[in-house]
Image: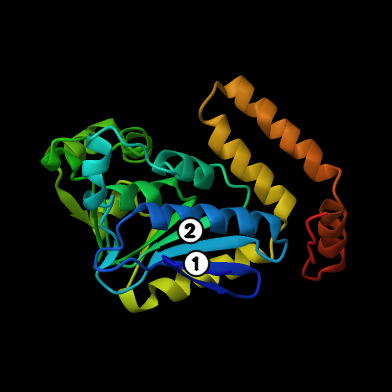
Amino acid sequence: MEFTKLIVEKKDGYVVAAINHPPANAMAQGVLKDLNALLDQCLEDDGVRAIVITGSGEKLFSAGADITEFAHYQAGGKPEISGVDVYFKIERYPKPIIAAIQGGAFGGGLELALSCHIRYMADTAMVGLPEVKLGILPGWGGTQRLPRVAGKDKALEMMLTGDYIGAEEALKYRIATRVFPKDQLLAEAEKLAARLAKGAPIAMKAILRAATEGLETTLEEGIKIEQEGSAACFASEDAKEGASAFLQKRPAQFKGK
């Protein structure tokens, strides 16, 4: 895997990708293209069962959209690749994606984290959607995902003021799944990725789909999605292996078949 705006390291069953676009790790076109390519490559690689996305450096996970590109869009130009599309791809990805927020996640950086399935955050990090201070709104899903995670009132307060919040408050409002000391954050995210990499891929794919798509529809339709996933799981070799391992009191060896 060769990328210009990501530092990618393949581990045993998972990948760690660090946004590397100094000084602010802005979500420029190059970063979005690399993320999109990474998702495509990992989807085809059975040896990758989980992804960790983090930022390079200590200060910023990502400061958000690249303001140097704004003039092009304001003049009527179109991006080659849309942050909206990439973030949808992450949210609906069939393998678990963990955001390891080691530094500030602002604007499009927080929108990226919100699209990930699980968000681990350093205790020193801050998050926010400050677009209103530039006379614009969070346009890569922030107005929709943040209220769904933190609740409408808190999301509106953050978006209308543009203020940042710290890790403790982010945890309170479910923006962070868990918070860790900064020097332990990446290790904890990798520990989770390694654990998920040993899990049942077909079952996790079904869980991710049911939990994501099911919440966008009625309870009845959500349960239909759940039952489709359940049928696929029961028909898999993984389900047979899981039952055998349980009865034999040994760790299961799931192969995604």
How far, Cα to Cα, is label 2 from label 1?
6 Å
> Are the two marked residues, 2 and 1, in contact with CB atoms closer than 8 angstroms?
yes
Please name the amino acid that badge 1 sits on: Phe
Q: Which residue is mark 2?
A: 34
Residue 54, position as x, y percentages in the image? 41, 65
**Of helix, strand and loop, which one carries label 1?**
loop
Q: Earlier in the sequence, mark 2 or mark 1?
A: 1
Residue 232, position as x, y percentages in the image? 80, 40
Q: Quadrant of residue 58?
A: bottom left
Q: Which quadrant would the N terminus be assigned to in this image?
A: bottom right
Residue 26, position as x, y percentages in the image? 29, 57
Crowding around mark 2 (Cα neighbors within 10 Å: few <14, some 14 to 19, many 20+) is some
Q: Nearer the viewer, residue 86 or 95?
A: 86
Q: Residue at x 44, y 46 (%)?
A: 115
Crowding around mark 1 (Cα neighbors within 10 Å: few <14, some 14 to 19, many 20+) is some
Q: Quadrant of residue 227?
A: top right
Residue 19 against residue 215 in the figure, above or below: below
Please name the amino acid that badge 2 sits on: Asp
Q: Residue at x 39, y 71 (%)?
A: 185
Q: Quadrant of residue 253?
A: bottom right
Numbered badge on residue 245: none
Q: Disc count in the image? A: 2
Residue 96 against residue 151 in the figure, above or below: below
Q: Nearer the viewer, residue 248 or 218?
A: 218
Compared across the picture, whether 245 is left or right of 193 comes to right
Q: Residue at x 56, y 38 (%)?
A: 211
Color scheme of the displayed model? rainbow
**Is residue 28 visible to the viewer in this orientation of the structure?**
yes
Q: Which residue is mark 1?
A: 3
